[in-house]
Amino acid sequence: GRRRSVAVVVSRFNGGLTNRMLQNALDALDEAGVAQDAVTIMPVPGAFELPLAAMALAKTRRYACVVAIGAIVRGETPHFEYVANEAASGLQLAGIETGVPVAFGVLTVENVEQAEARIDKAGEAVRSALEMADVFARLRASA
């Protein structure tokens, strides 16, 4: 993590969950040695907006990786399916199109209790993003 800039895009929707996930991600970045001043946090309204923000951040080429954090809790309508699918495919596309690793730290759960039990997935997303950034850096160095 040292000498790396990392962007974190976080959904404000379900903020009681995503704020805790953000703190978990920041703790994981600190543990990995990423300096606080090397972390950019971009809040967005909801999970549907995560891909657009991740793409914009990745296109700047200022970040070794982007971590997307959100929580999508199933409701009574099909809205859950649309948001979850678009968030997942959009975040994958952001990474593919830019070549910058974009980690999926988005919970897709049936209820808040399931989300509470998975707050630490944000830290896992950070570790995955940093690992992929290292892989890409080694690949570029050997090319």
Image: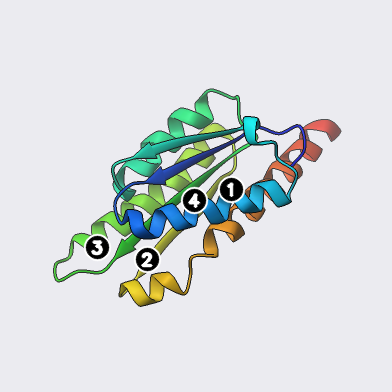
Task: Give the residue type that dot 3 points to.
Answer: Phe
Kindly identify which numbered label has been placed on residue 22: 4
Under circle 3, the secondary element is: helix
Residue neighbourhood size for the residue with mark 2, other residues' Cα within 10 Å, grouped as few (<14), some (14–19), many (≥20): many
Label 3, label 2: how many angstroms apart (C-alpha)?
A: 8 Å
Residue under pointer 2: 108
Visual colour scheme: rainbow
Under circle 4, the secondary element is: helix
Label 4, label 3: how many angstroms apart (C-alpha)?
A: 21 Å
Residue 131 as seen in the image, left or right of residue 70:
right
Image coordinates of residue 75 in percent, x first then y, are 19, 69
Which residue: 55% across, 65% down?
A: 120
Which residue: 73% across, 49% down?
A: 32
Image coordinates of residue 109 in percent, x first then y, are 35, 71
Residue under pointer 1: 26
Task: Give the residue type that dot 2 points to.
Answer: Thr
Q: Quadrant of the C terminus?
A: top right
Residue neighbourhood size for the residue with mark 1, other residues' Cα within 10 Å, grouped as few (<14), some (14–19), many (≥20): many
